[in-house]
């Protein structure tokens, strides 16, 4: 009879470990299914039963190998994030300025680079889905037919962020043509401000005073950096008026890129809440209109130059490297971000600013002045402040209360 009672009890008995509730069949030399399940569960967590019948689950600390693997994933994610932020910006800046130095080299068209990048990303996503579908063409066709052809409204909704991201990528080329890499890295952090403003407006999201203060400090820091007048050798070669004009064009491009990035990110979050579509299929849904929009932009902006000099005018191995890094790096970062917490992202942002300054000083003869250092420090401090979680203090009761436990039910009474 004891064996039947043990095997037919409710779900609250299933969580107990083998040490807490030994099975009757197990003591007789015949391990029951409950004992096997409890043994498997005991490998992951320990369940403690209190005298009043409550069960408390306590997780077992991960093993040393798991700690090492988690540390490798986190530091690997940090390395990839920093490499993407720094490498792409420096390569893009060098590719836009090296052609200006050489009179024989024609500067490549930014619109064609954006189109090739979007096409490359779309092709990579197709290959990934093909492999995930078992390398079967029919399975790939079924996936695309279901999530693209049979989901026209989903694709139509994603045309808005696709357009915004395409415009943003063109603006980044314009910004790095007129701004040095270090100044660009600092000013582009304004996307934190625009994202917060659009989140408060569109998602009705509230922010603490600390976060609003960090956004004010961020704005002040970017303004100081812009007023500092620091630049690399391409900035100093130009005349004072031309350098000031180029710097203003670069700042406007960065501001517009930050606005498009913030709005696109918030819009993307709003329309995709609760969606179960995978990352790669979502990139396909976004990639298709992005390729079309980028192709239209090529001929709307540079049709005459393409007709005269060709589509691939000014393309060198360096330009192809920039396009590849932007396409592949963006997808890698999208995968890596889910392994990176807020602290890691803040470190990546701060490291990218510092490393960009150091490499720019070596390669581009960048010489930051005191104002630039102060502004960049304020921007890095604001990102740290903004990433801190909100801690809300619990209000203490006016009257003291005593807690009494009776048969597992918690009762409270006022002390009079």
Image (cartoon, helix red, strand yellow):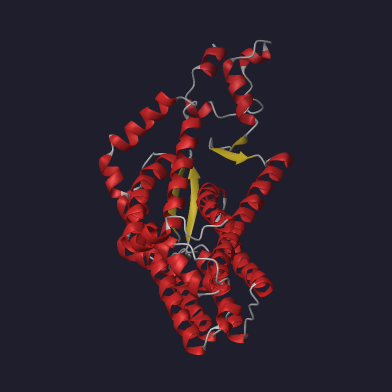
Residue located 43% across and 44% down the image: 122
Q: Is 128 left or right of 139, judged from the image as shown?
A: right
Residue located 57% across and 52% down the image: 340
In which quadrant is the N terminus drawn? top right
Taking the view exactly as shown, the residue that stands out farthest to the right is: 64
Asked which quadrant contains residue 82, the reply is bottom right
Residue located 59% across and 63% down the image: 86
Asked which quadrant contains residue 164, the reply is bottom left
Q: Is 218 left or right of 195, judged from the image as shown?
A: right
Residue located 48% across and 36% down the image: 127
Q: Is residue 208 above or below residue 34?
A: below
In which quadrant is the C terminus drawn? bottom left
Is residue 412 in view? yes
Task: Work out whether residue 10 or residue 124 is closer to the camera in this orientation and state it.
Answer: 124
Q: In this view, does 324 lie above or below 62?
A: below
Q: Where is residue 393 in the image (x, y as percent from the top left)?
A: 48, 65
Q: Is 42 left or right of 111, judged from the image as shown?
A: right
Q: Position of residue 74 (x, y in %)?
A: 63, 50
């Amino acid at each position: 009879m004891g064996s039947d009672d043990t095997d037919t009890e409710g779900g609250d008995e299933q969580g107990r470990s083998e040490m807490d509730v030994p099975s009757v069949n197990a003591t007789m030399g015949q391990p029951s299914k409950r004992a096997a399940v409890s043994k498997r569960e005991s490998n992951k967590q320990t369940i403690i039963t209190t005298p009043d019948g409550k069960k408390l689950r306590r997780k077992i600390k991960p093993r040393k190998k798991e700690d090492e693997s988690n540390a490798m994933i986190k530091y690997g994610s940090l390395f990839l994030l920093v490499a993407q932020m720094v490498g792409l910006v420096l390569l893009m800046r060098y590719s836009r300025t090296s052609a200006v130095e050489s009179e024989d080299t024609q500067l490549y068209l930014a619109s064609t680079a954006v189109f090739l990048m979007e096409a490359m990303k779309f092709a990579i996503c197709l290959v990934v889905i093909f492999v995930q579908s078992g390398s079967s063409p029919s399975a790939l066709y079924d996936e695309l037919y279901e999530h693209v052809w049979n989901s026209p409204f989903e694709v139509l909704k994603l045309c808005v962020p696709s357009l915004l991201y395409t415009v943003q990528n063109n603006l980044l080329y314009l910004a790095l043509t007129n701004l040095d890499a270090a100044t660009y890295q600092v000013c582009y952090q304004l996307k934190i401000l625009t994202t917060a403003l659009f989140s408060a407006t569109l998602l009705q999201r509230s922010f603490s005073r600390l976060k609003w203060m960090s956004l004010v400090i961020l704005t002040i820091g970017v303004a100081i950096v812009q007023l500092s007048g620091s630049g690399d050798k391409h900035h100093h070669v130009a005349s004072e008026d031309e350098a000031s004009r180029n710097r203003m064009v670069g700042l406007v491009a960065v501001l517009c890129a930050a606005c498009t990035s913030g709005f696109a990110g918030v819009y993307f979050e709003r329309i995709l809440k609760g969606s179960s579509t995978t990352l790669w299929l979502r990139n396909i849904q976004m990639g298709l209109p992005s390729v079309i929009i980028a192709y239209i932009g090529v001929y709307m902006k540079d049709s005459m130059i393409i007709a005269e000099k060709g589509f691939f005018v000014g393309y060198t191995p360096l330009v192809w490297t920039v396009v590849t890094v932007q396409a592949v790096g963006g997808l890698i970062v999208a995968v890596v971000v889910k392994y990176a917490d807020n602290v890691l992202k803040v470190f990546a942002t701060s490291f990218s600013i510092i490393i960009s300054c150091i490499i720019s000083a070596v390669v581009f003869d960048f010489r930051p002045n005191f104002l630039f250092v102060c502004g960049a420090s304020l921007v890095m401090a604001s990102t740290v402040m903004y990433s801190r979680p909100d801690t809300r203090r619990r209000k203490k009761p006016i009257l003291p209360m005593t807690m009494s436990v009776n048969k597992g039910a918690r009762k409270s009474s006022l002390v009079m």
